[in-house]
Image (cartoon, grey):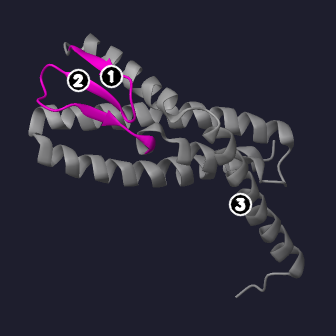
């Protein structure tokens, strides 16, 4: 088994400390924006997409933001976990803490990560809604919990892995 040098331990420590500090910093910044704005963003664009597929409904701006669909007897609540803010803060912190990679690639990685996470988050939300519509609330609750956990792992670990491999690939 290969022994890790003290220099490597310092690099690992710097990376982990960077993630911790930046994660706290980004969470602080995100807390400055009312949570309802993020929830409304997802609720609005989800409803607009659903309208394209034949659904109709309205949005109630409160905490959490509620979407009332005519086909469902209860509203859909868009809460903090629906926003993907936790995932965004973690991906931003991880990419920007990868100190061995040039800053331009880290910034681009954070921007691309934002687009990827928001896109996957919309997919997760829409998939959960369609599962509720097709299979009922119990299947919807199960799939929502499962998709959330998979989304959390795949988007954070998966994106970081792909970004890191692409960023460290030699030309």
Residue nearest the observer in this picture, 143 or 154: 143
Q: Within the image, what quadrant is residue 81 found in?
A: top left
Q: Is residue 63 left or right of residue 115?
A: left
Q: Mark 2 highlights which residue?
A: 68
Mark 2 and mark 1 lie on one chain; the one further toward the N terminus is: 1
The residue that appears at 38% across and 25% down in the rendered structure is: 43
110 over 69 or under it: above or below? below
Distance between the alpha carbons at the discs numbered 3 and 1: 35 Å
Mark 3 and mark 2 lie on one chain; the one further toward the N terminus is: 3
Residue nearest the observer in this picture, 12 or 27: 27
Residue 60 is tagged as 1
Are dots 2 and 1 in contact, CB under 8 Å? yes
Q: Mark 3 highlights which residue?
A: 20
Q: Magenta segment, which residues?
A: 56-80
Q: Is residue 130 magenta?
A: no
Q: Is residue 68 left or right of residue 92?
A: left
- The residue carrying pointer 1 sits among few (fewer than 14), some (14 to 19) or many (20 or more) residues within 10 Å by Cα, namely some
Are dots 3 and 2 in contact, CB under 8 Å? no
Distance between the alpha carbons at the discs numbered 3 and 2: 38 Å
Image quarter in which the N terminus is found: bottom right
150 over 127 or under it: above or below? below
- Give the image location of residue 35, x and y in percent: 51, 35
Q: Within the image, what quadrant is residue 44 found in?
A: top left
Please tell me whether mark 2 or mark 1 is closer to you in this view: 1
Q: Is residue 19 left or right of residue 142?
A: right
The residue that appears at 85% across and 73% down in the rendered structure is: 10
Distance between the alpha carbons at the discs numbered 2 and 1: 8 Å
Q: Is residue 61 magenta?
A: yes
């Amino acid at each position: 088994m290969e022994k890790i040098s003290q220099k490597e331990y310092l690099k690992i420590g710097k990376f982990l400390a960077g993630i911790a500090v930046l994660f706290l910093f980004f969470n602080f910044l995100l807390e400055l924006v009312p949570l309802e704005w993020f929830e409304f963003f997802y609720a609005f664009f989800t409803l607009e997409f659903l309208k394209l597929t034949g659904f109709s409904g309205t949005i109630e701006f409160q905490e959490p933001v509620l979407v009332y669909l005519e086909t469902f007897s209860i509203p859909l609540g868009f809460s903090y976990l629906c926003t993907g803010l936790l995932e965004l803060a973690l991906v931003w912190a991880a990419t920007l803490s990868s100190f061995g990679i040039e800053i331009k690639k880290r910034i681009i990685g954070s921007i691309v990560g934002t687009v990827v996470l928001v896109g996957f988050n919309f997919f997760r939300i829409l998939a959960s809604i369609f599962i509720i519509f097709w299979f009922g609330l119990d299947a919807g609750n199960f799939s929502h919990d499962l998709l959330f956990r998979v989304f959390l792992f795949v988007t954070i670990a998966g994106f970081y892995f792909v970004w890191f491999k692409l960023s460290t690939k030699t030309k």
